Image (tube, coloured by chain):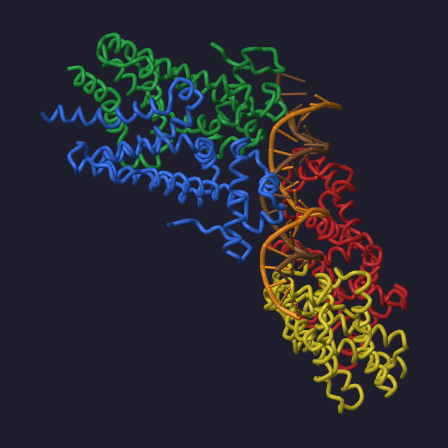
Chain colours: A blue, B green, C yellow, D red, E brown, F orange
Amino acid sequence: MGKKKVPSLVKDEKLIQKRREEMVKAAVTLFKEKGFHRTTTREIAKAAGFSIGTLYEYIRSKEDVLYLVCDSIYDEVRSRLQSEIVMDQPGINRLKEAIAAYFKVMDEMQDEVLVMYQEAKSLSDEALPYVLRKEIEMTAIFERLIQRSVEAGNLFLSEEEVNLLAHNILILGQMWTFRRWALQKSHSLEAYTQFQIELLLNGIEMNRKASKV
Amino acid sequence: MGKKKVPSLVKDEKLIQKRREEMVKAAVTLFKEKGFHRTTTREIAKAAGFSIGTLYEYIRSKEDVLYLVCDSIYDEVRSRLQSEIVMDQPGINRLKEAIAAYFKVMDEMQDEVLVMYQEAKSLSDEALPYVLRKEIEMTAIFERLIQRSVEAGNLFLSEEEVNLLAHNILILGQMWTFRRWALQKSHSLEAYTQFQIELLLNGIEMNRKASKV
Amino acid sequence: MGKKKVPSLVKDEKLIQKRREEMVKAAVTLFKEKGFHRTTTREIAKAAGFSIGTLYEYIRSKEDVLYLVCDSIYDEVRSRLQSEIVMDQPGINRLKEAIAAYFKVMDEMQDEVLVMYQEAKSLSDEALPYVLRKEIEMTAIFERLIQRSVEAGNLFLSEEEVNLLAHNILILGQMWTFRRWALQKSHSLEAYTQFQIELLLNGIEMNRKASKV
Amino acid sequence: MGKKKVPSLVKDEKLIQKRREEMVKAAVTLFKEKGFHRTTTREIAKAAGFSIGTLYEYIRSKEDVLYLVCDSIYDEVRSRLQSEIVMDQPGINRLKEAIAAYFKVMDEMQDEVLVMYQEAKSLSDEALPYVLRKEIEMTAIFERLIQRSVEAGNLFLSEEEVNLLAHNILILGQMWTFRRWALQKSHSLEAYTQFQIELLLNGIEMNRKASKV
DNA sequence: GATGAATGAGTGTTCATTCAT
DNA sequence: TATGAATGAACACTCATTCAT
């Protein structure tokens, strides 16, 4: 799936996976609290339950931890999203459900999402593309769902507009976390979701239908 | 206007303002390039044209520089925005123009906007609220514009929805910079603006009109 | 022959010898390339074809590897030298042949010789004497050859001078490797050997003969 | 004089020179004792009388210290040598005096000479040539002295032989330090010098004279 | 007010060595 | 005997901050 290979001195693949999971879990907690730069490798090792030497048996550099964290968060977002999406919905409802599911995942994974979007910029030029690709894949998921509604005659959108709409969905989901200091005081997730879906879909739908008539 | 006071050892207020402007200009350039954490105070002082000792005559800590930078960028965004907004537009057009103006400012100040939103998290708990307040003020500008259209009968929105719509405008402007690696390849600023305005305003407008009938 | 005993956890002497040969061969290659300090025990083990754990079954510390390397190089120098020396030469010619043979061995084993003389200083106070003794033995070989010429009336040298001449021979052979960056560009091994033999032997020989007359 | 420039963060050139002298003095003492690799930068700073931070205001890396040490030792060897050489000696005696002076300097600076020749190999590929050039310059000094004796008809040597003889002089001086564990027990510096001068000069001289006759 | 040399706590990373399997 | 994962002391180097001049 186009993952970047992070080399390890340890050979046992099962063990690598296990240790990296512990490490990522510890790192996410710490990054949430104090950010990537203010977290030391020693703290990560300690929180993960092993020594600094052991940490470096499983990564080459601190940046590798950040990459593994981003990678892991994306994978979980995606996997939760896919398990939430109900595929038996007909037409445009499937898209609506998908948006609601995505917003729900964003809500549940607020801290992780914040960490990822705020720290990813510290990735090297070499690692960044791998993370951007994940974002592109997320966008593509919604592009496909939108496209299906277009093909079903539920939406009237050019290819360019399909792409923009997908980006909008993604960022409005992230906005729920980015601006939580403002939004989550005044709005419930349900109301927020309701509003955004209406804006993103009904609006356009009605608009174009109307203009076609 | 609710600014945080950053103490200085120097008495001459004019001098303080001058030196801080030089310092912020230098810092923005450097933060753009390498981020806040990777930029050293020495580099900032040098780029600003004075010694490290002098830098510390005008701030107490590196974080003060970041605060001044954020503060300065907000002020410029706001000032550019206000000079762009044409106040003599009637009804909903004024809002549309304001959105377009805001997007234009975001486009022109891409690097600064990115710096601000990516590094502000490094501000201390003491300084952060001052920056958030700026964001709230920005939101309020759009809330007022939207409210006016509601009152003029051009839009049908509850108070809660007015607030959400304002947030949407802000974040969709920021999205043009956050996701420029994806958006600015495929879309022109004009097309992007056109699309978002239609989505944000016409959509809702038509929708509600239709549902009222 | 006065070798230092390097303890091993393994009992089988044959195995010890085999493993240590592999280890020394690997280490020499690595030491040549990057020196003793920059070579890690892991690298030595890997290059030798076994695990780091196994390496430590046959030595107690990294320094033991260095000792074994020095020891092994000395043994090879000596063994090559002895196989080159033609013992059936009469009088002073036997000494000349021995010097030429020694220079030839130095030339063939340049890298090893450099490694040994540059890294031996890192040996502990405990191990160093064992290596120095080897150097003393090498000196003794030439002292004996010189002495024989003195006794045969080919050279006129005091005991002290015999010792100094032997040291001269050794160091002029090493010089061919130490200063190769200067010597090997401008001089062939043959010319170099020719010159040094003349200087070391004919010179003195003629000189004393002349002065005696 | 073809020195490598070692950058410093400090601007005051006088201060740089002073601090570097302190640093080199401290480093030489430590390198003598435990070698370059076993000496830490903190130890050097402490022995020099300043903090680790200050040390790094005057160098970029530990290797810079080694370069400064080598550079400084060469400069002192050369300066001592030149102050010892009596220029009013006629003919071949000037060369003999020079050799004796050089051996005397080697004797006085034993520890420094050992440090330099044993650790110079740890210099980077970038710095090494600068040190080698110094050695070449030393060789050239003796080449010139020998050449003068050749031109005066005191020695009969080809250009190639002049070069080799100069190298011999250098290494026989160094040998007095390298092999001090053997030489300095059995021989006085005077006897050593006497023997080597005779070997290096009288030998060749007489030899060629004889062969010419 | 301005300077820049001095400081030292703190950071990422390495690597010889051990020991349970 | 052989393995290789685990360890943590140790290291080179950085950089925000101070303060004497």
- Determine which quarter of the picture holds residue B170: top left
- Determine which quarter of the picture holds residue B100: top left
- Check the image and name the residue furthest to the left: A213
Q: Nearer the viewer, residue C10 or B27?
A: C10
Q: Can you give x and y, in whole percent of width and height, for residue C20 in the image?
A: 68, 71
Q: Residue at x 65, y 62 (%)?
A: C53
Q: Can you give x and y, in whole percent of width and height, for residue B125 in the image?
A: 55, 21
Against B206, residue C87 (above or below) is: below
Position of the N terminus of chain C, as image quadrant, is: bottom right
Residue D203 in view (yes/no): no
Q: Residue at x 59, y 20 (%)?
A: B59
The mark total stands at 0
Position of the C terminus of chain C, as image quadrant, is: bottom right
Q: Nearer the viewer, residue C155 or D89?
A: C155
Q: Nearer the viewer, residue D126 or B43?
A: B43
Q: Residue at x 48, y 24 (%)?
A: B25
The answer to whether B68 appears left or right of B184 in the picture is: right
Q: Can you give x and y, in whole percent of width and height, for residue B43 in the image?
A: 56, 31
